[in-house]
Amino acid sequence: MDHMNCPNHLDGTYEPPTLTVDSVIFQLISNELSVLLIKRTTEPFRGKWALPGGYNAAGETTRKAMARILEAKCGVSMKDILLIEQLYTFDTVARDPRGHAVSVTYMGLARDLTLKTTATTENPQLFSVNNLPKLAYDHADIVRYAHQRLSSKITYTNAIFALLPEYFTLTQLQTAYEAILERKLDKRNFRKKFLSLDLIQASDQYYKDGAQRPALLYRFSQQKLHTPMQGFG
Amino acid sequence: MDHMNCPNHLDGTYEPPTLTVDSVIFQLISNELSVLLIKRTTEPFRGKWALPGGYNAAGETTRKAMARILEAKCGVSMKDILLIEQLYTFDTVARDPRGHAVSVTYMGLARDLTLKTTATTENPQLFSVNNLPKLAYDHADIVRYAHQRLSSKITYTNAIFALLPEYFTLTQLQTAYEAILERKLDKRNFRKKFLSLDLIQASDQYYKDGAQRPALLYRFSQQKLHTPMQGFG
DNA sequence: ACAAAAGTGTTAAGAATACACCCATGT
DNA sequence: ACATGGGTGTATTCTTAACACTTTTGT
């Protein structure tokens, strides 16, 4: 944080690396954890799928850059992203063939994105994490990292609220956990444990879906991040 | 990650913010968790204590910048920092009065630093986290964040090995946990639990210290990060 | 009547907690 | 002999894990 010891430019000029922001936006689609990707229309990696990302200029916070980029490239509004968390900053020199680009990455959780494809947007699309195309840059690493973070986050917080509709059944909740943790959970133990945490409350509404008993709908009492859990799974 | 949608400079020029690296280096000193600080000799915050930090130029990874800065400002070699972990990237526009500076922060754990004060170094000194001076910038926030991260890290990994001498007694180990977690632990339960984790092994050496029974010395079987724990405390 | 998902309790094993005395040494 | 920290075991509570049948609905 001092002008002395500037590494490369002893004449006093200082050239920072490019700063970029990349976002891993998750949403559940038919019981699969899915991630928002765009198809690149320019070099490098033209035609490859990539995380929505872009430059961060001086004077702009990384979160504001993220909002701007998601709006511009995917037509996604931050209002539809219910939980945002900074993940990690990737900084290897060779990750962008054009030159040193340091990327601050974020994870965002959404329940129902509406994607636009216009002149400025770049074919945004949601892919199941179990069926991703080859990704540009080191974005496959970033998605893996985000998935791990999400897995542990939902075991000690109520973060999953941001992926579920406001009203949901206990089976939906359990299925969401199973999709993210990638393993089956015991129905009775899951319900007993989750209800004991006092994070959700029953409504008086039922969800009807075909030839079966209707399911009671619940909702999270707090629509923001809480960490009152000891662990799940 | 694309030259389109560059936010501020529609003429095509792109000006990234300054990129800096700040390090929170922890060490235990007489049973207190301590952090490495330097006294600033230039504006802004001249005369204030601050985390060792500095510029990161294009072409240099943040870890290499960290190594360079610690060497230059504190005479600290990375070989003496046994565990390094990226913490968070602080990016608010106003955190540096000179202009927008985005700081990638790291936590480093050391067992026995030797600090040099020379022409280029800046009065490096270790302060107990419970007795910090007023810090420059948002560095007090960064230290708090690092302390929290360390607290949770030692509850599910063997990270504490990096703060202890190679051979240590169980009391030293427990005291280190207590210093970091800031609460007392039960001696018998602590020993039972920790020994059951198979992270440490007894040596055949004893530590003698005055008028009391000598204590058996242990060491960590692995001197690198492992995460086989369910939780501590 | 049947298919399909909702809903519900008990038992056993394991983990966490609370707690008090003897041991080895130096002075 | 005494002061100092080292070392040890058991009983209780809580948490986790395993496991199968009845209920409600639509066709």
Image (tube, coloured by chain):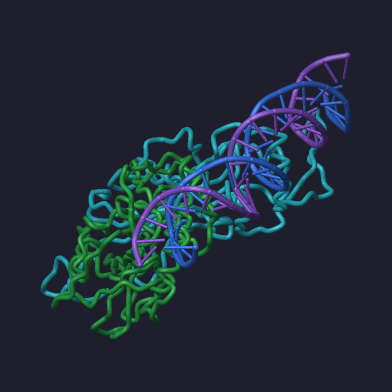
Chain colours: A green, B cyan, C blue, D purple
Residue A117 placement: quadrant: bottom left
Q: Which of the pair D19/A72 is nearer the observer? A: D19
Q: Which of the pair A206/B115 is nearer the observer? A: A206
What number of labels is visible?
Answer: 0
Above/below status of B131 relative to A95: above
Residue B122 in view of the camera = no
Residue at left 68%, top 58%?
Answer: B222
Above/below status of C14 relative to A51: above
Residue at left 36%, top 46%?
Answer: A218
Q: Which of the pair B77/B35 is nearer the observer? A: B35
Q: Which of the pair B178/B55 is nearer the observer? A: B178
Residue at left 54%, top 58%?
Answer: B77
Q: Residue A164: x percent and y percent?
A: 34, 55
Q: Residue A55: x percent and y percent?
A: 24, 69
**Quarter the N terminus of chain A occupies:** bottom left
Q: Residue B156: x percent and y percent?
A: 58, 50
Q: Residue D7: x percent and y percent?
A: 81, 37
Q: Residue furthest left?
A: B11
Residue A133 placement: quadrant: bottom left
Above/below status of B57 relative to A192: below
Residue at left 66%, top 39%?
Answer: B174
B111 left or right of B73 in image: right
